[in-house]
Amino acid sequence: MCMVPKMRESMPQTPIFPSMLGSACSGQVQPEMGEQCGDPVYQDGCLVSGSLEALIERLVPTVDYYPDRTYIFTFLLSSRVFIHPHEILAKVGQICIKQKQQLEAGTEADKAKLKSFAAKIIQLLREWTETFPFDFQDERSRKELKEIAQRITQCDEENGTIKKSISQMMQNVLLALSTRGQFQEIREKIRQPVTDKGTILKAKPQSAQKDILSVCGDPLILAQQLTTIELERLGNIYPEDLMQIITHMDSLDKDNHKVCSYITVFSNAAFHAFPIHPGCVSMLVATEICRVVKKKQRTRVMEFFIEVARECFNIGNFNSMMAIICKLFDFLILVLLSSFVFNWQHHMDPSSNFCNYRTALQGATQRSQSANSSREKIVIPVFNLFIKDIFFLHKIHSNRLPNGHINFKKFMEISRQIHDFLTWKQVECPFEKDKKIQTYLLTTPIYTEEALFVASFENEGPDNHMEKDSWKTLRSTLLNRA
């Protein structure tokens, strides 16, 4: 699992985003640098803007300076909007060469500082490779990394400590890339929805067919199994994925319809990467309800999923909770809910920008920060809302200021939100996997939207002329697909 790395060296470090819920600003000026009013620009000790060249220079350590972790994370996360990672590495390498040559040409005291300087450069590269390993998927990035490493190794040829550190760092990069490749192979094996007319147009369910209640009749256990899957999926989403919404949006038109379409596409590509993404949860819920013929049994299934949603909420798994609630109120199965009062709908109330949900999320986040057990640390946000927040934060603030400087203050806020996400994904899942339940959740066939229409009409029947016409058209279409 990729995360913001812990510091292994003894050099002083400020914590990354030290006041997540407060107004304190990170990216502070180092004491030895002093307050600057040129390039980059600071306000009240906080970096707010700068040219790309100045920000890159601030990234590279010197004998007397090491950038704080918040700055490293924010710059490496946001810089890809303006420049490719391999180009940054090339510039970092050039600055390193210059500093190394100055030390070598200096006094004996300067030469003695070479090892300290080399250790700081290795630490920076280690943080980079651990936090953003997929920047090194590009062969050009790996080439630049090796060239920097080769130059730095010359500073410690006697005992080989730096060489060993570099070797381990390179192995970790290759391992992360390999793990990513394995995950992508799993993603390609997503189950196909049921479209066969014989399966959909049925008079009654097959007697041997399993349903969710026969596999797991305890709402708490099912909520826990959904949470284990969600946490595993979180572990395979990286900050680079989240920044794609910015790097790709800039190439699209300003058309609002295209914006909404892009958010949907991005959600499918980055957040729906695991076989049981929120869409699958919603469709699974609808399938389980609609394929039951007897109304009493359907009510029982709906009540069961309502309890599952409640348990997901209590756990802090808002993504599964919202997926279940949304489908329970979906127009496809609304006719099945007409006689049932669901008192949980306020959690999905979109008024005031989902104020109720955001209040619950903030409460779960505060609980997580002070929790001692893994069970209380779980926070799984509603992914679509999370990426929309990042997207609109990007849209309302410009990337560059009128003077051409990069609007670093904007990217600090974006990286603060993404760091929240990284904190949530680091939580170790406290629930044991149930192979039988998870196999069912990941492999049981689910209906398409069209199939859900058919199953709903099969069970309840159309109420008016419009529904009757729709039902006839759908049934005729499916029967003609042989």
Image (cartoon, rainbow, N blue to C red):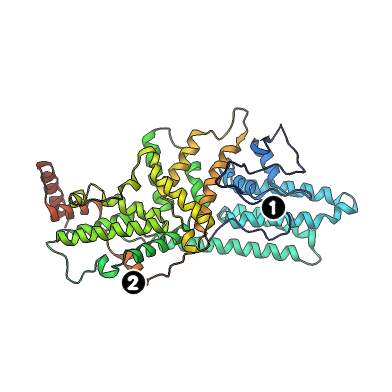
Q: Tell me the amino acid under the disc marked 2.
A: Lys
- Numbered circles on residues, count: 2
What is the crowding at mark 2: few (fewer than 14 residues within 10 Å), some, or many (at least 20)? few
Residue tagged 1: 13
| Of the pair 377 and 43, the residue shown nearer to us | 377
Relative horizontal placement of residue 349, taking residue 14 as reference (left or right) = left
Can residue 198 be seen from the camera position used here? no
Q: Secondary structure at mark 1?
A: loop
Relative placement, left or right, of 136 versus 107 is: left
Whether pointer 2 and pointer 1 mark residues with C-beta atoms closer than 8 Å, the reply is no
Quarter of the image with the C terminus is bottom left
Residue at horizontal 58 percent and vertical 33 percent from the top: 400
Q: Which residue is mark 2?
A: 436
Q: Which numbered tag is attached to residue 27?
A: none
Furthest toward the right, the residue is: 108
Secondary structure under tag 2 reads helix
> Does residue 124 appear in the picture of this structure?
yes
Image height of 439 relative to 466, above or below: below
Identify the residue at horizontal 59%, vertical 27% (top origin). Answer: 402
Q: Tell which of 465 and 158 is nearer to you.
A: 465
Please tell me which residue lies in front, 160 or 147: 160
> With 104 as the anchor, is 366 left or right in this view?
left
**Image location (x, y in percent) of residue 77:** 57, 47
Residue 94 drawn above or below residue 146: above
Q: Amino acid at mark 1?
A: Gln
Disc nearer the start of the sequence (2/1): 1
Q: Quadrant of residue 281?
A: bottom left
Across and down, in percent, residue 254 comes to 43, 32
**Gap in Å between the C-alphas at discs 2 and 1?**
46 Å
At a point 55% along the width and 61% down the height, the residue shown is 176
Residue 143: where, in percent of width, then height?
64, 55
